[in-house]
Amino acid sequence: MMHVLSFTDFEGMLEELFETAERLKREPLGEALRNRTLAMIFEKASTRTRVSFEVAMTQLGGHAIYLSPKEMQMGRGESIADTARTLSRYVDAVLIRAKRHEDVVEFARHSEVPVINGLTELEHPCQALSDFFTMRELRGELEGARLAYVGDGNNVCHSLMLGSAMLGMHFSCATPEGYEPRKEVLERALSIAELTGATVEVVHSPEKAVRDADFIYTDVWVSMGQEEEEQERLRRFRDFQVNSELLRHAPGAKVMHCLPAKRGLEITDEVMDGESSVVWQQAENRLHVQKAVLLKLLRP
Ligand code: CP
Ligand code: NVA
């Protein structure tokens, strides 16, 4: 049994997942997960992850149950371990979006069914998997592709950085000082890159990061749970906006965003609605790629 807690849990199966997703995008598979149930625990807001996973289960003939911790006994103090043990007796997999990554790890430790990280403060593996699928659709070969990430060294950045390293890509990340990706994640990515021929760098100049990029990626400056830091962050990230001026340094690059976007902050309307933007293709692909993940984890 496997869990998907970090992007690195996709090790050895990336190509298979991409090929399955490609097939599913062309011809939806009717009943492969008939009678299978996915529990989805959301401790934070979600539009795309919640809906795409639920629709994926429905379209594969299965069922998804949305659970809010506030309405579960967990909200009244039942332990994560006991919740995991109980849900394992009913459902076939559990998707969790949690405030603390360690809670998802703890859940997985006591779960008898696969656990999928639907975003924590540390990683967003299903988002990144789907984004690499989008890049593959647009460019073909991922090995050697150049991905520039501009903004906060956050959960999405971490999963993209690990994935780029695994896929032999060139990942350049530009953040303000003090907002770099976590050191332990960077070190992990660098050691994977040594084996795959990928390059991973962290800089403080957006112009430098995006030079020769195939893809420019950005995400919100204030992630869920960081609302108290908002004013400080808005000030520190001012020069890290993805706008037409920045795109001039990377002609031909496609612009990506996991969404939701704060238009006018990390990305301008002009860029998000412009010709380089592939954000809606990205959003759609969550559905196809997560179906591939669900089949991998749940098919009897
Ligand atoms: N990109 C993403 O995970 O979006 P949601 O927060 O809407 O799920
Ligand atoms: N970094 C963002 C991603 C949202 C999908 C957050 O954690 O809020």
Image (tube, helix red, strand yellow):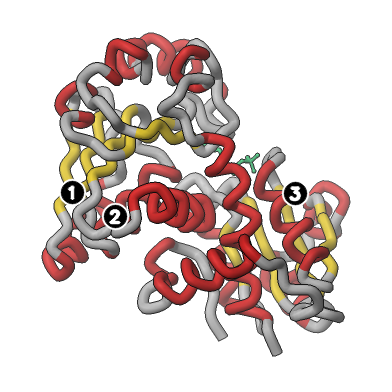
Tell which circle, 3 or 1, labels the residue nearer the N-terminal end: 3
Relative horizontal placement of residue 158, taking residue 299 as reference (left or right): left
Real-space CA distance between mark 2 and mark 3, rounded to the nearest whole angstrom: 26 Å
Residue shown at the point (20%, 31%) measured from the top left: 209
Quadrant occupied by the N terminus = bottom right
Q: Please provide percent x and percent y for residue 65.
A: 84, 61
Mark 3, residue position: 51
Question: Is 238 drawn above or below residue 79 in the view shown?
Answer: above
Q: Please provide percent x and percent y for residue 147.
A: 28, 42
User: Amino acid type of disc 1?
Assistant: Val
Which corner quadrant of the image does residue 254 belong to? Answer: top left
Mark 2, residue position: 164
Mark 1, residue position: 200
User: Amino acid type of disc 2?
Assistant: Ser
Taking the image in four quarters, ligand 1 sits in the one at top right
* Circle 2 SS class: helix
Real-space CA distance between mark 1 and mark 2, rounded to the nearest whole angstrom: 8 Å
Question: Is 14 drawn above or below residue 261 in the view shown?
Answer: below
What's the mark number on residue 17?
Answer: none
Q: Find out whether the residues at labels 3 and 1 contact each other: C-beta distance under 8 Å.
A: no
* Circle 3 SS class: helix
Q: Find out whether the residues at labels 1 and 2 contact each other: C-beta distance under 8 Å.
A: yes
Residue shown at the point (17%, 63%) measured from the top left: 191
Quadrant occupied by the C terminus = bottom right
Residue shown at the point (55%, 25%) measured from the top left: 261
Which corner quadrant of the image does residue 80 belong to? Answer: bottom right
**Mark 1, residues whose alpha carbon is within 10 Å: few (<14), some, or many (≥20)?**
many
